[in-house]
Structures are given as C-alpha cells and as structure tokens.
Image (tube, rainbow, N blue to C red):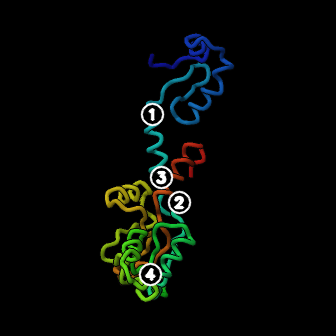
C-alpha cells in the first residue's frame, strides 16, 4: 500500500489499538521514515534506516570526534616512549618538536621490535631511530569528513591517524592538533545507536 494510511487502518491491520501504536509511529516520524498529514494519515518517505544513518554520518567531521594526541619530544629515548605508552594506555605516540610540529609516529609494534633485540640499551636509543618518519605517515585534517578518515584508516591498515594543520608557507610542516582512532569511530557508532548524535 502506497499510503497515506490512517492510524486506525494500521492498528486494524496489526491487530493493535491506536494507543499502542502511538509511540512507535512518533519514533518513525522523528526518524524521518514516516511523515504524517493531519486528517489524511501516514505515508512512507522513501528513506530507509541505512540512508538515514548515512545522512547523519555525512555531517560529522574529524574535529567532532577527534581526541587528544599523546606526544613525546623527538629527543626522548625508546625507554621513555615505552613508559609513556604504558602509562597513557595508548597504542600510538606522536613524536613532535618543541613547536608541536609532527616529526613521526611510534607504535607498539615499533617498540616491541626494538625491545626484542638482545643487548639493546633502550635508554640510549633515540626515539627518532625507531619511529615512522613524516614522509611515510598518512594524515587527516580536522575539517575532513569523519567517513573519509575511516576510509583512510581501513585502506592504509593503521589504527590511528594524526589530525594536522599544515603550516602556512611550508606545506611539509604540520602542526599536530589531535588524533583519530578506531576507538573514536566505535564511540561514534555507539552514540548514534543510543540516539545521542553529534
């Protein structure tokens, strides 16, 4: 049936009372799946729940869901990075200079490989020796769509992206302003599922 269809007719078809349907119909109207016209009835808008989710997510930007990056000075040692990673309970540390310009990234995997070398003096190895350098890092800007950042994470098979702003006059320099991780996207999906939105 194309509609519009009255509340009484829906209730009759389902074997329920109009009062029992009232809250369900209100939810369907608020979500945009149904619309209603007084004295005419309800009709299907053509939107499905997947389309509505896509519409909701398309408005969310990286800046809306990014979190605070855990950073370490580039002059610190591998030992310092291991301690920081343990204390902050993160899988990625961003290596920056004194102006908060991104220089590299170090992951659990990088630190584990270094720590497994027998006879390695972790206090003596500069973090710059084991980090992934700037030339091999994939980044995202705060104004990018969150869905685009998720695609970058998936396509590059990484757990975390630095959120950066390029320095005017020198596009190779990037100021670190945040991070975006798989956890940020999990939290976003939970918020959407619970109706909190952004």
Across and down, in percent, residue 30 comes to: 58, 35
Q: Nearer the viewer, mark 4 or mark 3?
A: 4
Q: CA distance from mark 3 to mark 2?
A: 10 Å
Q: Residue at x 53, y 17 (%)?
A: 5
Q: Residue at x 52, y 35 (%)?
A: 32
Answer whether labels 1 and 4 touch (C-beta < 8 Å). no
Q: Secondary structure at mark 3?
A: loop
Quadrant of residue 97 in the image?
bottom left
Q: Residue at x 39, y 83 (%)?
A: 120
Answer whether labels 2 and 1 touch (C-beta < 8 Å). no
Q: CA distance from mark 3 to mark 1?
A: 17 Å
Q: Secondary structure at mark 4?
A: helix
Q: Which numbered disc, 4 or 3, marks the residue that appears first in the sequence?
A: 3
Pointer 2 residue: 64
Q: Residue at x 50, y 52 (%)?
A: 186
Q: Which numbered disc, 3 or 1, marks the residue that appears first in the sequence?
A: 1
Pointer 3 residue: 59
Quadrant of residue 6 in the image?
top right
Q: CA distance from mark 1 to mark 4?
A: 53 Å
Q: Which label belongs to residue 47?
A: 1
Answer whether labels 4 and 3 touch (C-beta < 8 Å). no
Determine whether, in the image, residue 105 is placed left or right of residue 190: left
Q: Secondary structure at mark 1?
A: loop
Q: Which numbered disc, 3 or 2, marks the residue that appears first in the sequence?
A: 3
Q: CA distance from mark 4 to mark 3?
A: 40 Å
Q: Nearer the viewer, residue 179 or 125?
A: 125
Across and down, in percent, residue 147 comes to: 41, 54
Q: Nearer the viewer, mark 3 or mark 2?
A: 2
* In the depicted structure, whether residue 125 falls above or below residue 156: below
């Amino acid at each position: 049936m194309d509609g519009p269809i009255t509340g009484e007719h829906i209730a009759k078809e389902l074997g329920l009372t109009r009062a029992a349907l009232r809250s369900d119909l209100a939810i369907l109207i608020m979500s945009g799946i149904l619309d209603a016209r007084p004295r005419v009835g309800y009709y299907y808008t053509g939107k499905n729940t997947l389309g509505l989710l896509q519409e909701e997510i398309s408005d969310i930007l990286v800046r809306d869901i990014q979190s605070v990056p855990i950073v370490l000075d580039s002059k610190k040692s591998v030992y310092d990075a291991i301690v920081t990673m343990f204390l902050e309970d993160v899988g990625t540390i961003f290596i920056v200079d004194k102006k908060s310009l991104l220089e590299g990234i170090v992951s659990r995997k990088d630190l584990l490989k270094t720590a497994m070398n027998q006879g390695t003096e972790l206090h003596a190895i500069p973090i710059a020796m084991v980090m992934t350098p700037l030339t091999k890092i994939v980044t995202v800007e705060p104004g990018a769509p969150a869905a685009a950042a998720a695609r970058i994470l998936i396509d590059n098979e990484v757990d975390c992206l630095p959120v950066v702003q390029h320095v005017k006059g020198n596009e190779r320099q990037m100021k670190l302003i945040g991070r975006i991780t798989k956890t940020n996207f999990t939290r976003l999906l939970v918020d959407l599922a619970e109706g909190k939105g952004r």
